[in-house]
Amino acid sequence: MPLAVHPPYQKYEVAVRRSPIDGYGVFCAQAIPSRRKIGEIRGEAIPIHEARRRALGLQRIMIVEVSERKAIDASRSTDPMRFTNHSCQPNARLQIRDGRIEFYSLRTIEPGEEITVNYGETHHEGRLACRCGAPNCIGRL
């Protein structure tokens, strides 16, 4: 059920709190049915070369490349979905649509459950240990 207190692109109520995976995470505050849009991340639009420069040496990267030429830096965003952690067995997926960073549930996500996505290829280039704890964990991001 969409909540009026959120921007129109945040469709379900979520909460940001400490995560057993890494740092902070985004947690479901209400049940989210399978295959539903959860929300989006907004941020500063920057060129890819600037995104890659900013990502150098960072352990927590809140930058998503949305095209071959443009990326979104969400490090200063107030959108809660920017805290979505990686899992090798995610319950949601990230989708780039018309330059927007959207999140969709892969299955029903229960209240209190951390919302996770598979980051796929990252700016970490295999240098960061994965701490998702999934049985099929790939070990590195």
Image: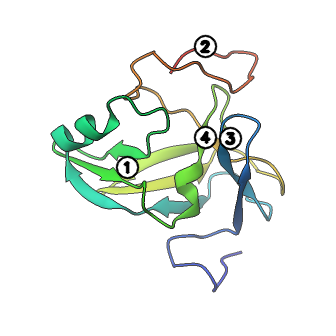
Q: Position of residue 8 (x, y in %)?
A: 51, 78
Quickly name the residue at label 4: 85
Which callout, 2 or 3, points at the residue further toward the start of the chain? 3
Q: CA distance from mark 4 to mark 2?
A: 14 Å
Callout 1–callout 3 Cβ contact below 8 Å:
no
Quickly name the residue at label 3: 91
Tell me the element at label 1: strand
Position of the N terminus by quadrant: bottom right
Q: Amino acid at mark 3?
A: Asn
Q: Which of pointers 2 and 3 indicates the residue nearer the eye?
A: 2
Mark 3 burial class by Cα count in 10 Å: few <14, some 14-19, many 20+: some
Horizontally, residue 119 falls left or right of residue 14, namely left
Callout 4–callout 1 Cβ contact below 8 Å:
no
| Residue 42 visible here | yes
| The label number, if any, that marks residue 138 in the structure image | none
Which callout, 4 or 1, points at the residue further toward the start of the chain? 4
Residue lying at 30% horizontally and 60% vertically, measured from the top left:
44
Q: Amino acid at mark 1?
A: Ile
Mark 4 burial class by Cα count in 10 Å: few <14, some 14-19, many 20+: many
Q: CA distance from mark 1 to mark 3?
A: 17 Å
Quickly name the residue at label 2: 139
Farthest front residue?
Answer: 57
Quickly name the residue at label 1: 96
Name the one closer to the observer, 88 or 129: 129
Name the one closer to the observer, 72 or 34: 72
Name the quadrant containing residue 15: bottom right
Callout 2–callout 3 Cβ contact below 8 Å:
no
Q: CA distance from mark 4 to mark 1?
A: 17 Å
